Image: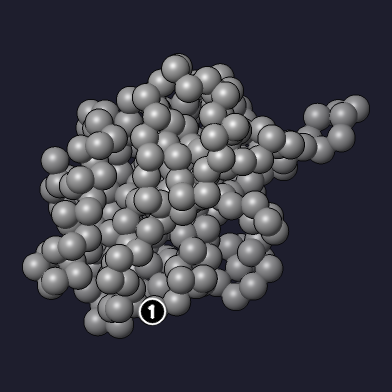
Amino acid sequence: MLAAKLNKPALDFFRTDGRPAGWAVSPEPVPYEAAVAAMEARAAAIASGEAGELVWLLEHPPLYTAGVSSKAGDLLAPDRFPVHQTGRGGQFTYHGPGQRVAYVMLDLTARRRDVRAFVASLEAWVIGALDAFNVTGEIKDGRVGVWVERRTPGLPPREDKIAAIGVKLRKWVSFHGVSLNVEPDLEHFAGIVPCGISAHGVTSLVDLGLPVTMDEADAALKASFGRVFGGVEAAEAPI
C-alpha cells in the first residue's frame, strides 16, 4: 500500500550492518535551544564513532523556527512566540504541544550517502505512519513535507500540510528531522507562512476527525520506521 501511494517502489534506508537505531521519547516538553545542543553533540559523537544512532521523539513549548531558506516577510507575528534561527533546511515552521517532533540522528555512511533518497525515506516513514490511521499522505512537487487532501461536499478539494520535514547533515550524520501534527493548536500557525506556502493550510490527525493520542502516533511512527529504516532499540533521551 505504501509503494502505491508514493507511485514508486517502497523505499528503505537500512543500515548495511543491520544495527538498530536508538529510540528515545521525552515525556515533558524540551526547550528548543537545549534540544539543538543535545542533537549536535550526539551527531558529533555518532560521526566520531563514540555513540550510536538515535531517533528522539519530543514536544517543544510553542515557538517558531527559521530554516536557512526563511524569508523575513513570512514571520507574520514576530512577538507572539520565541523565534529561533536554525541550520536545518526549509523556511519557517511552528513547534508546540500536541505536535510530535522526531529528531533523527542517523549515520548515512552506514546506510547510503544519498541525500535525495534519505529525504524520500523520511517522507515514506511519515506516510507509512499516517496509513495506520487510514490517512493518505501525499508528496507534492515543489512543496516540502507531507500533505493530505480535504474534500467537503459542494467545495473544491483543498490540500493541507500535516507533517513538516527539515534536516541537516554534518559529516554524513543527520540531525533535525520531522514534525507530525497530532493535536496542536492550529491557530498558532497563523503567526507564520508555514514553509513559505500561503496557498494551502495546515491540519492535524485530530483536525481530520481522528482522536489519535500521542502514544498511538508514536506507535505508528515506530512501526513505520522499522519498515523504512530498520530496527530500533530502547534508548535514553539525550537530556
* Residue 12, percent from left and from top: 45, 73
Q: Is residue 118 above or below residue 70?
A: below
Q: Among all residues in the image, which is located at the extreme left?
A: 50
Query: Seen in the image, is 78 located left or right of residue 136?
Result: left
Q: Quadrant of residue 148?
A: top right
Whether residue 239 is visible, yes or no, is: yes
Specify the color scheme: one colour
Q: Is residue 133 visible?
A: no
Residue at position x 14%, y 40% in the image: 239
Task: Check disc 1 and give the amino acid type.
Answer: Arg
Instruction: Please give the name of the residue rendered at 45% of the width and 40% of the height, measured from the top-left corner.
Output: 66
Residue bearing the label numbered 1: 112
**Position of 198 relative to 143 (above/below):** above
Q: Give the x, y percent position of residue 41.
A: 16, 54
Q: Residues within 10 Å of mark 1 (few under 14, many from 20)?
A: some
Between residue 34 and residue 68, name the one nearer to us.
68
Residue at 41% over, 73% down: 13
For residue 228, side relative to residue 141 (left or right): left
Secondary structure state at the residue bearing disc 1: loop
